Image: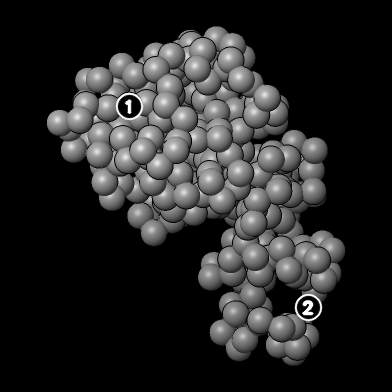
Amino acid sequence: MEELENKRYWIWLSLIKNLGSKRKLRLLELYKTPEEIYKLTKEELLNINGIGEAIAKEIIISKNEKILNYHIKYMKEKNIKIININEREYPQALKKIYDPPISLYVKGNIEKLNNKNIGIVGCRECTTYGKKSAEYFAYNLSKQNINIVSGLAKGIDSYAHLGSLNNGNTIAVLGNGLDMIYPKENLELANEIVKRGGTIISEYPCGTKPDKMKFPARNRIISGISSGIIVIEAKEKSGTLITVDFALEQGREVFVVPGNINSINSVGTNDLIKQGARLVTTYEDVTKNNHFLK
């Protein structure tokens, strides 16, 4: 409880809705700590470039000690920690992206976050080929002490986590609070990830419900903490391609498993190969030129 108490103002800052990562980072640049931001009056907030009436009002209203104390107690009960962008445990690769989250809620092994990480992403409605490919790459790469990063969604995400579960080398990145596992059928998988020595993380505080509008923001973290991503099955306009865009923007390696030319699940992946992404058919194709692995 004491550790969470010492981070109460980081928790408070994460609870403010409609105040994005860039604005929060800007406030931290100006005032150094969340506690100093907490002390600001409405008039002082309005003097800050980019902070209008609505945002200033929301920041002031958010200063609710009762709600803050509830969150601290609840996190303690659920064994959920928080790390901020200035801490050693915060993923250093993520810190360097354009809009890193100021803090991460963590359940499980925090030390995993700064190890060698590779993301695996793809279709929710995957084929048997996609399932087996995800399990193959996840299992063999995790045996090399590489963490498999994915989003705990149905399909490829789930099989990537399952494939790496025996080695305990997996990180699930959520687009909602850590106490609201989505989809619900993956609750057992989420518990097993933590039990086996893996990690579950989110930039969103407890109580944040799943919202498809938050998933693209989640994807920037999947690629952000990874040295590269492996794409396994993606339709022509798949949400998976959003993660690819983030990866390229962040300077990450993009690997693609080729797919059946007659399958709609492979249109996006095969197009990526045409555009120059690295084709991989074995896990050695990923590790043989491992200069990118940090």
Task: Tell me which residue sits at (49%, 54%) in the image.
Answer: 217
Q: Which of 219 and 111 lies nearest the eye of the viewer?
A: 219
* Label at residue 258: 1
Q: Which of 23 and 232 lies nearest the eye of the viewer?
A: 232
* Residue type at the position of mark 1: Pro
Q: Is 61 situated left or right of 180 in this image? A: right
Residue 78 percent across, percent down from the top left: 56, 37
Quarter of image, res 136 = top left
Q: Is 85 situated left or right of 124 in this image? A: right
The secondary element bearing badge 2 is classed as: loop
* Label at residue 26: none
Task: Name the residue carrying label 2.
Answer: 40
Q: Quadrant of the C terminus?
A: top right
How many callouts does the rendering have? 2
Residue 177 percent across, percent down from the top left: 49, 47
Residue 256 percent across, percent down from the top left: 41, 30
Q: Which of 216 and 73 lies nearest the eye of the viewer?
A: 216
